[in-house]
Image: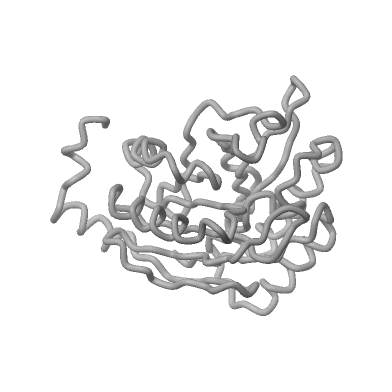
Amino acid sequence: MNLICCQTDIVWEDKPANFQQVRQMLEQTTVLPQSLIVLPEMFGVGFSLSIDVIAEKESCETEVFMAQLAQQYQSCVLGGVVTEATNGKGLNQAVAMGPDGEICRYTKLHPFTNGNEHHHYQRGESIKTFKWQDWTVAPAICYDLRFPEVFSMAAGQGAELLVVIANFPAKRELQWRALLIARAIENQSYVIGLNRTGDDPNVHYSGGSLIIDPLGHVVTERGSEPGVLSAQIDRVKLQEYRQIFPMLADRWLM
């Protein structure tokens, strides 16, 4: 499967500017049909707590934009969207859109308490997986990365590709890299760690997006500049590795 990951410098609370940035990146990239296109957490607005300003309205403009990309490129688009819960709090979600419409919606299980996210966003209730090009894919969001049980449970549900979309601060870039590699090794899975870069009113971000193979090798990575990260991954090789070294079958949690 072909992976296309857009590491963007998100413009604060400006959906049109961020949509245009993604469009330009993809126009300058070879996107094969049936690819998986990945966009960062809250890619349209940045890590904002102003739910009334940024949440999807009736027009669902972020989701419409993603659906248009999915149709245009005949691919699956996975990216971060903010919606509103019935209690007025926000939902920090990873939504996957295929050419025929939505195929997965995951709500972040672990709002970032150190950044007061838990006061503004309602936590999710369950792990989600979806199928794309025979792969079982499990999305996760930013702070979820620090909780290995999330990824173990996803692997227990058959996940072969773990996708972490994030706004992960530069001051914790060492942990970002180490934890992503650990999640790949622990779960014998490919891992995408897609971060944003640049600055918002509160935090500096250093990018550092990675695609990692099931043995923990970095397939490709990007530094601090905006741009596209791409790779081809092989499901047959993943299955062969899991058969040769059947570690997941020994995990009691499963």
Q: How many marks?
A: 0
* Direction from residue 10 to residue 148 in the image, left or right: left
**x and y, in percent, of residue 27 in the image:** 70, 75
Taking 95 as reference, is 193 above or below it? below
Quadrant of the image containing the N terminus: bottom left
In percent of width and height, residue 186 lies at 28, 48
In which quadrant of the rendered image does the C terminus lie?
top left
Tell whether 218 sits left or right of 10. left
Q: Position of residue 226 (x, y in %)?
A: 65, 72
Q: Position of residue 207 (x, y in %)?
A: 58, 65
In the depicted structure, whether residue 100 falls above or below residue 194: above
Between residues 57 and 32, which one lies in front from this camera angle? 57
**Location of residue 69 (image quadrant):** bottom right
Which residue appears at 47% of the width and 56% of the height? 176
Left or right of 121? Residue 103 is left
Could you tell me which residue is drawn at 32 percent across and 36 percent down? Answer: 156
**Farthest residue toward the top?**
87
* Residue 124 location, quadrant: top right
Asked which colour scheme the image uses, the reply is: one colour
Between residue 247 and residue 12, name the one nearer to us.
12
Q: Which residue is painted at 36% across and 50% down in the image?
A: 183
Task: Tell me what residue is drawn at x 72 percent, y 26 percent.
Answer: 85
Give the vertical position of 158 relative to 232 (above or below): above
In-image side of 164 versus 77 (left or right): left
